[in-house]
Image: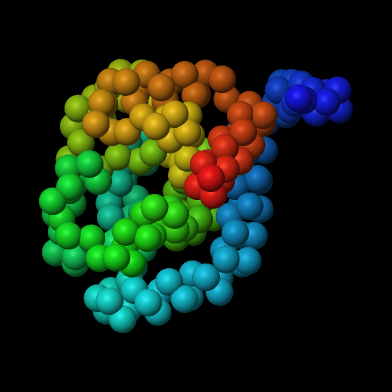
Amino acid sequence: MISKIDSLLFYSLLKYNEYVDFPNMIRIFDIFFSFLGLFFLSPILVIIFIIGWLYNRSPLFTQERVGQFQRTFILFKFRTMPINTLSVATHLAKNTKINPFGSFLRKTKLDEMPQLYNVLIGNMSLVGPRPCLLNQKRLISERNKRGIFKVKPGITGLAQVSGITMKNPKLLAITDLEMIKQSSLFYYFYYIFKTIFLNIK
């Protein structure tokens, strides 16, 4: 049950963005939390890097993605699939062999942690539509029609906490638009904490 103090806090967060430069405020939070995340998680990141190196000598995975205003950028992840895997969406790579360590990284979402660096340098936000691949033409089209590319892509968002994937481009684009329309500090923190809760559940 939400207390009166919690209700007042949530209401304040919902209203706060009416009186501030919301994009700049979010950028400040992105820088702050991504730096803290990289700093405090650095021992874990180093361990994952070393184990990944022992598996395939190439623990980091880089991939070109579509970012804000449809500008491309390099996204960083820990490698979970073989080095020569084709650059396709995860749901299209079902038959690709994932090693046990890679499977663990995916289940815990630890493979996504290097994207904190993308957030820190400004390619991404902690919250936003997941960045798509250049070859996902249908999703790019659906998002372009709805103005999704006006905002930065993110690590998590409404689609992620709702279990909506890139299998359904139109539904994903509609969900992204809904998230953008209800953008506020409350939802920014809601999606972050909801994602953490789902991953440790």
Which quadrant of the figure has residue 172?
A: top left
Q: Position of residue 71 (x, y in %)?
A: 33, 41
Colour scheme employed for the rendering of this structure: rainbow
* Relative height, residue 63 to residue 12 (above, below): below
* Relative height, residue 122 to residue 162 (above, below): below
Residue 61 visible: no
Q: Nearer the viewer, residue 101 or 155?
A: 101
The residue that appears at 22% across and 41% down in the rendered structure is 91
Across the whole image, how many numbered discs are drawn on residues? Answer: 0
The residue that appears at 52% across and 70% down in the rendered structure is 44
Q: Position of residue 51 (x, y in %)?
A: 37, 77
The residue that appears at 32% across and 59% down in the rendered structure is 103
Say whether residue 1 is left or right of residue 115. right
Residue 136 visible: yes
Q: Position of residue 39 (x, y in %)?
A: 61, 67
Classify the position of the N terminus by image quarter. top right
Say whether residue 118 is left or right of residue 142. right
* Relative height, residue 111 to residue 48 (above, below): above
The residue that appears at 26% across and 26% down in the rendered structure is 169
Q: Position of residue 182 (x, y in %)?
A: 56, 20
